[in-house]
């Protein structure tokens, strides 16, 4: 949400008011508009805690995730077209990424998800993320000029590259954690 607000401010800087309004609506939705004031973060965190039995709320990001957040912060300090390209990349990839997360959670749970968590993913995959991507794509298209295409593309690709590295490093963290946990269990026996 923080990055979406930065993108909204960048859109306002260049008077892309329709884009700024679209991002404002996305932020309101993420913060609980339409979900009885419960933010999407809290819906997800509560659902994961219930389903997996692990604390999620107020946890410290992993080293890999902290690195991604720093990279994204630097991307969002760029020029408006670059930032809006980065923002669009996040929206455009949300459905494939969430689909992967759903598969992973189902695998961890060995079956069906709790109702609240299923609601979170169904709404994101079948409504919210589709609307966010379409709204952002449509509003940006109304403002962007040909001379801004390269900058927009560069921002898009910067986020895609950062997320690719993040997913690869998350996999390495998971493998490393599994090995460390396995060794700890073996030492106990």
Image: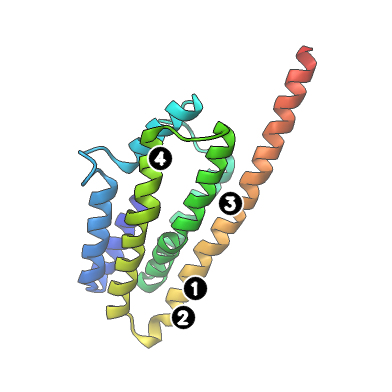
Which residue is tagged 3?
Answer: 166
Give the crowd class for mark 4: few <14, some 14-19, many >=20 residues within 10 Å: some
Upstream in the sequence, badge 3 or badge 2?
Answer: 2
Q: Find the residue positioned furthest to the bottom.
A: 146
- Disc 3/disc 1 C-alpha distance (Å): 18 Å
Residue at the disc numbered 1: 154
Q: Nearer the viewer, residue 86 or 167?
A: 167
In this picture, residue 67 sits left or right of residue 185: left
Gap in angstroms between the C-alphas marked 2 and 4: 39 Å
Between residues 154 and 91, which one lies in front from this camera angle?
A: 91
Colour approach in the figure: rainbow
Work out whether residue 93 can be spotted: yes
Tell me how far mark 1 sits from mark 2, CA to CA.
6 Å
Circles 1 and 2: CB distance less than 8 Å?
A: yes
Q: Closer to us: mark 2 or mark 4?
A: 4
Q: Which residue is mark 4?
A: 118
Q: Is residue 62 visible?
A: no
Q: Can you tell which of label 4 and label 1 is closer to the viewer? A: 4
Proximity of marks 3 and 2: CB atoms separated by less than 8 Å: no
Which label lies toward us, 3 or 1? Answer: 3
* In this view, 99 is above or below 38: below
Q: Identify the mark at residue 150; answer none if there is no mark.
A: 2
Local crowd size for mark 1, using a 10 Å CA cut-off: few (<14), some (14–19), many (≥20): some
Give SS at disc 4: helix
Relative image position of residue 112 (x, y in whole percent): 49, 35
As displayed, is residue 80 above or below residue 123?
below
First in sequence: mark 2 vs mark 4: 4
């Amino acid at each position: 949400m923080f990055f979406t607000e930065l993108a909204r401010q960048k859109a306002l800087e260049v008077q892309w008011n329709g884009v700024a309004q679209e991002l404002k609506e996305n932020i309101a939705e993420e913060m609980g508009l339409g979900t009885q004031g419960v933010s999407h973060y809290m819906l997800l965190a509560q659902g994961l805690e219930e389903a997996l039995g692990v604390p999620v709320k107020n946890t410290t990001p992993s080293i890999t995730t902290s690195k991604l957040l720093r990279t994204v912060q630097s991307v969002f300090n760029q020029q408006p077209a670059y930032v809006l390209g980065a923002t669009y990349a996040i929206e455009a990839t949300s459905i494939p990424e969430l689909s992967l997360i759903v598969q992973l959670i189902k695998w961890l749970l060995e079956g069906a998800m709790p109702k609240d968590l299923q609601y979170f993913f169904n709404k994101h995959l079948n409504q919210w993320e589709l609307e966010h991507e379409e709204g952002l794509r449509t509003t940006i298209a109304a403002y962007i000029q040909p001379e801004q295409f390269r900058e927009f593309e560069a921002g898009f690709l910067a986020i895609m590259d950062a997320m690719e590295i993040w997913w690869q490093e998350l996999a390495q963290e998971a493998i490393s954690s599994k090995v460390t946990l396995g060794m700890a269990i073996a030492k106990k026996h």
